[in-house]
Image (spheres, rainbow, N blue to C red):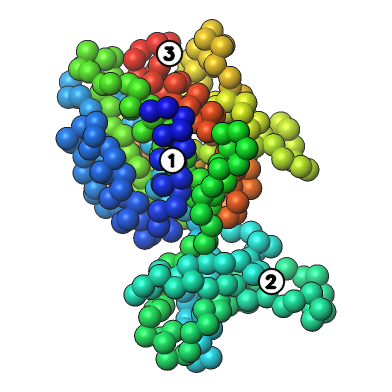
Amino acid sequence: MDITKFKELTARLADAKGVSGSEDGIAHMCAELMSRYTDRVEIVNGNVYAHFGERRDKPHVLLDAHLDKVGLICTDVRDDGFISADMVGGIDLRSMPAQPVIIHGREDICGVICTLPPHLKTSDEVMTKDQLYIDTGLSPESAKALISRGDPISYEAECRELIGDRLCGAALDDRCGISTVIQAIDELHYTDDMPYTLTVMFSTQEEIGERGACIGAFTVDPDICIEVDVSFALAQGEDRKKCGTLGGGCMIGVSPTLDKALSDGFIAFAKENDIPFDIEVMSGTTGTNADRFTVSRGGARAVTLSVPLRNMHLPCEVIDANDCMTTAKLITAFLRGDVKC
């Protein structure tokens, strides 16, 4: 697909429901998308699997991106009609006051997180999670009829285009990883004479402990794993050594826990073919599903390919779609056997 269609797909995925633990909607959407490329698509325990080729004498590759996004969960519907909430995944409480949200109850209910106006504040302290209350405008009776404890809550932030090929949305982590994988499969045109058999996995509950990756790696038992996620793009006040650059290409992971030959192979191929990239150096674990893949069963060789992203876990995450396209090129080249590792 061209970059215009790619951006449309990414925005559609980013706007889909799917706070960790409540990913049914996005899972079925992804299964339908992958059914265009193979008739062997299934959803098992929340994970979406799409299989290519018959496993015989070839190495088997697991290509993964995660389905879920950070959000909130309803902890109580108060007698005054306000909704108490707690965090699902790593959320910065500084971003919460006055944030518009959607409570996914018996129907979708719009609300806003309560905050004091500056005229009434007595300190500059950041709110605590015990102070997370949502105002829906509903009466206590209506709120209790429509909303239940345990209902997921997501940011109300539609994905939109910025200048150039940049996108801004609330769940580009890791919906842009999903669209990148789909772009790679679209370019690949898998055939049985390729050097690898393949399972594409879109995994559940990454943001609350990489849980889908645990069961997925055990189920698939791959030889090689490619994890497609996001990492930090340089903004203001950040350490350049820890960040990539928007528009600077894929961030290829290098870590003691990753397979050096895979990382070196992707780096060499990108250099030889003038594909923009950056090297993401991590001194230990990666904070991605790759950490689970390397220690499942007898272990698997793993590498991370990350899309640079600003404002992670906020309702205004920003990516450059060109970075996704170059990441997809690297994945396709690997699956065709052009990356030597």
In the rendered image, residue 210, in percent from the top left (x then y), is placed at: 43, 48
Q: Secondary structure at mark 1?
A: helix
Relative to residue 168, is residue 257 depicted above or below?
Answer: above
Instruction: Compare marks 3 and 1 and give the one earlier in the sequence.
Output: 1
Q: Quadrant of residue 23?
A: bottom left
Residue tagged 2: 127
Q: How many marks?
A: 3
Relative to residue 105, is residue 277 depicted above or below?
Answer: above
Q: Residue furthest top?
A: 272
Q: Secondary structure at mark 3?
A: loop
Instruction: Compare marks 2 and 1 and give the one earlier in the sequence.
Output: 1
Quadrant occupied by the C terminus: top left
Q: Residue at x 53, y 39 (%)?
A: 230
Q: Amino acid at mark 2?
A: Met
Residue tagged 1: 8
How far apart marks 2 and 3 lie (CA) works out to 49 Å
In the rendered image, residue 275, in percent from the top left (x then y), is placed at: 54, 16
Label 2: few (<14), some or many (≥20) within 10 Å?
A: some
In the rendered image, residue 227, in percent from the top left (x then y), is placed at: 44, 34
In the rendered image, residue 319, in percent from the top left (x then y), is placed at: 57, 39
53 to the left or right of 99:
left
Q: Which mark is in front, 2 or 1?
A: 1
Q: Nearer the viewer, residue 19 or 141?
A: 141
Relative to residue 125, is residue 310 depicted above or below?
Answer: above
How far apart marks 2 and 1 lie (CA) works out to 36 Å
Q: Residue at x 44, y 21 (%)?
A: 329
Q: Amino acid at mark 1?
A: Glu
53 to the left or right of 59:
left
| Mark drawn on residue 339 | 3
Q: Amino acid at mark 3?
A: Val
